[in-house]
Amino acid sequence: MASPALVSPAAGALVLATVVVLGYVLYQVRSYRLLCRGCRRLRDLRAAQRELYRRLEAVCRRLDALLSRVPGQVRPEPYAADDERAASLSTDLKTLLDVLRTRVRPLESLPVPTFSAGALIAGHYRRGLPRVRTELAFARGLREDLARAEQLLDELESVLERMARRPLEVRELYVDLEALAEALVQEIGAEQERGTEGLQPLVAEVEGIRATALEWAQRLAGGGAEAVEAVVEAEALRLQLLRRLADLYAQAGRVAGMHDQALRALERLDAAQREVEEALAQLGPPLAAAIGAALRDLKSGREALRAHYGGHDTAAYLEVSQQAWALVARARSLVRQIGRLAAAEQRTAQALSQCQHGVEALRAQLAQVQTECPATLDLSAAALERAEQRAFEVQELWQRAADAADGADLERLISLLGDVEVLARAARQEQEEALTELWAWQARWRRIQEVLRRLQASEAEHDRISNAWAALQGYDRANWSGIDPGWFEWYTRERTAIMADVSELRQLMASGQASQSAGAELVERCEGLSQHWQTLLREGQRVIAALGAAQAAERQLQEDVAALLTELQEVEAANRELPADLEVAAEVRALGEAIMAAYAELAEQARRAASYDLRRLHDEGVRRIREQLAVHRLTYERVLEEQHGALKRRAAELWERWEPLSQRLARATPLTEVEYRPLA
């Protein structure tokens, strides 16, 4: 049997050959189908070839008929563009038809092939495809060229028809021109009815243009060769008339625009005057007097322009527009100045009002703080006096600015108001600083009272420290965790000094003799007392912590002593179980009695905490007893092992004695001669 290594290449080659053969067959079958389809299409095109000849002859006849209508040279407007296009189209058509006449021929007749396996294998179908494709491409090119020739012929025919309609189009344009002239005459009449003068010369000229347009429209309506020849002249004249009509329309618009411009300028001037009056109403009477002269000049200029506008002249319209523009600019500048003056007056009045209210608020706050925090408010009283003086100065400067308003320069007046505002804001700033200082004194007073109350209420903490010190006296000093024996005397002395200062400060604050200027010093003094007391409290916490450590050591020692009692009871029970005649039992009992004596001594020392170091008792006494208990336990186990060994040796001796006896009994009396049941 062949190995897989030899079979696999052979199978692969067979599969590859099969795929190649199958692909070649499919390729030839597709070529056969394409050849059949091409032959059928070529047969259809050959059948329709006569129709192509007829279309070509029809195109040639139409072109011959249209070439006689194409002008030999390009004529002026409005025929220039159409003549150029017609000449270009005729040239292209002649060239294209010459090419068609040269190329046209009958198509080859190729029969539809029949299917044959031999031809398929030999590749005849594939070799016949290029000939069929070439013939089909030739037929398709002929039809495309013929279709393009027909398209160009249709375009040439439409151009020639448009050229034939040109006289009628120009006539329609003249009719439109006559309608434009009539509409302009009507608009000029409407402007004259509205009161616009200087338009009558324009009406006559527009009527002349209208008559000319009507005459040419009638001339072109006759038709014939005369109308075709007159189209060129009519088009040139129409463009001139249209430009002149546009100029007349613009001129009429300028005249009407001057009238409207002057009228709108007067309306803008009226609106600007109303804005000045509305802005002037925002000012107070003293400052409004400064604007009176400017407003009177504006009104007189407006009345003069109204009188000049009645002349109904273009020059008067132009002059009114220019002068009204200048007056409007002056009025708007005046409005801006009034707005600045009004804003300055509003800011100044607001600053002045804030200054007055600030003085009242400072006075009220001073009275309230004096009631709540009785003391000598020397700083705030001086600040109130300065605030009242500054408010008086601000009011006096404001009065001077109001008195100087009549006839004063606006910029100077605005500057004076700015000075008043600056002074008022400075006064307000001083008032805010005085209020801040007053509130700071109030906060200091409350802080002093709070500290004094807290120090006065520190008796509970003092009692807790004193009780802890008294309880700590019940323990040996070795249990004090490094506390100095003279600590409490120092603590009592410092505490007494703190409470004396607290009492002195309370008397000072209650009597109202404390001054605001000394507030920072008083607060610093109180904070120092508070910090000193906190230092004493932290030292007292050390005493309390030492007491807690001593009590914890005492509890731990007592718990360990109680725990040892259980183990001692086990020792006593073990000693009682030992045989009295055992030699090593005396050693175990002596060890147990020593443990009991050490325990009794440790328990007695644990009850006398004032005389012993509890940590040392715990670390040394308890550990020593535990070590003795461990030795006792090991000794007891050794005794038990020795006793067990002696018993094993005794049992072995008994067994040795029993074995010879059984052997002797077996030899003396055979087992078969003895009754078994009695022996059992």
Image: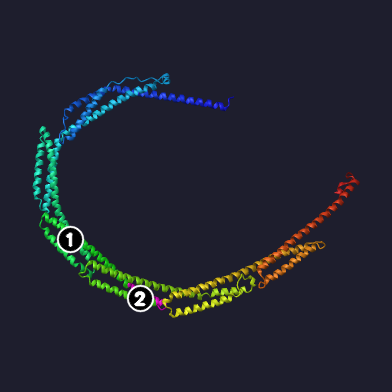
Amino acid type for the residue under numbered disc 2: Leu
- Asked if residue 363 lies in the magenta stretch, the reply is yes
Tell me where residue 412 sits by quadrant.
bottom left
Task: Please state the horizontal and vertical placement of residue 643, each as a whole percent of the image.
Answer: 80, 58
Q: Nearer the viewer, residue 317 or 275?
A: 317
Residue 280: percent from left, percent from top: 22, 66
Amino acid at the residue labelled 1: Leu
Q: Residue at x 26, y 27 (%)?
A: 145
Residue at image coords 35%, 22%: 131
Seen from the viewer's position, the closer of residues 254 and 58 is 254
- Residue where numbered disc 1 is placed: 327
Disc 1, SS: helix
Badge 2 is on which residue? 384
Q: Which part of the image, by quadrant, shows the N terminus?
A: top right
Q: Residues within 10 Å of mark 1 (few under 14, many from 20)?
A: many
Q: Quadrant of residue 356?
A: bottom left
Res 496 label:
none
> Magenta region: which residues?
357-377
The secondary structure type at the circle numbered 2 is helix
In the rendered structure, the answer to whether residue 393 lies left or right of residue 276 reads right
Residue at left 78%, top 58%?
640
Q: Quadrant of residue 242?
A: top left
Up the image or down, 615 lies above or below 215; here it is below
Judge whether residue 147 can be spotted in this image: yes
